[in-house]
Image: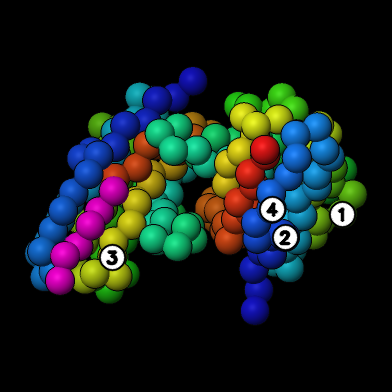
Amino acid sequence: IAGITQAPTSQILAAGRRMTLRCTQDMRHNAMYWYRQDLGLGLRLIHYSNTAGTTGKGEVPDGYSVSRANTDDFPLTLASAVPSQTSVYFCASSGTASSGYTFGSGTRLTVV
Amino acid sequence: GIQVEQSPPDLILQEGANSTLRCNFSDSVNNLQWFHQNPWGQLINLFYIPSGTKQNGRLSATTVATERYSLLYISSSQTTDSGVYFCAVAVYYGQNFVFGPGTRLSVLP
């Protein structure tokens, strides 16, 4: 079934540890995105990639990095996790500028 | 940047009732999308509707881009319609979407 796969589904992480959230899509979409969702703050864009080999910063990029080595994968890395990065993280993709987003199922991350 | 407002923030309905959710935005947009986040957290694309009207079963949406609003209609609501409905907009094609704060809908049996 075509779509976006995120892993892990959930994770408890000690502060200061490094963590990579994985996102893979099989729809050959050019654009991919990482959002975080926090209660009362809605969905906020962390990083995006309009095409393989390019990335850009969103609204809340600090503490996160991304890479886009190929079309299908868009991992999000927390170099040194802090409790304020506790959130639900959603990966999304878009095939064209006019096709809208498809979201993954999310990763619930708790930093303690 | 563009501001997105949604109303009402919360809505409680009896099963079978109809409802209208509104999305206002502060600038003209070329992209607009409605999403439903179900109680399990999944975000589901409902409509991609930068202008005009679309219908999908009991749901329909209308966007009047020149007046900077979009409406989502839910008819004959069911308990499975419960969740949060988000509007997301982008000013230009290819620009990242900005999400509104959502409307939380609870449909009671």
Q: Quadrant of the C terminus of chain B?
A: bottom left
Is residue B106 highlighted in magenta?
yes
Q: Read off the chain for label 3.
A: B
Tell me the tag on residue A7: 2
Question: In whole angstroms, how far apart are the C-alphas of marks 1 and 2?
Answer: 18 Å
Which residue is at a point 58% across and 41% down the rendered structure image?
Answer: A87
Callout 3 and callout 2 share a chain: no
Judged by its main secondary structure, the magenta piece is strand
Question: In whole angstroms, how far apart are the C-alphas of marks 3 and 1?
Answer: 37 Å
B66 relative to B56, above or below = above
Question: In whole angstroms, how far apart are the C-alphas of marks 4 and 1?
Answer: 25 Å
- Horizontal placement of B75 versus B52: left or right? left
Label 2 residue SS = strand
Which residue is at a point 29% across and 70% down the rendered structure image?
Answer: B80
Q: What is the total number of numbered labels drawn onto the structure image?
A: 4
What residue range appears in magenta? B104-109
Give residue B54's quadrant in the image: bottom left
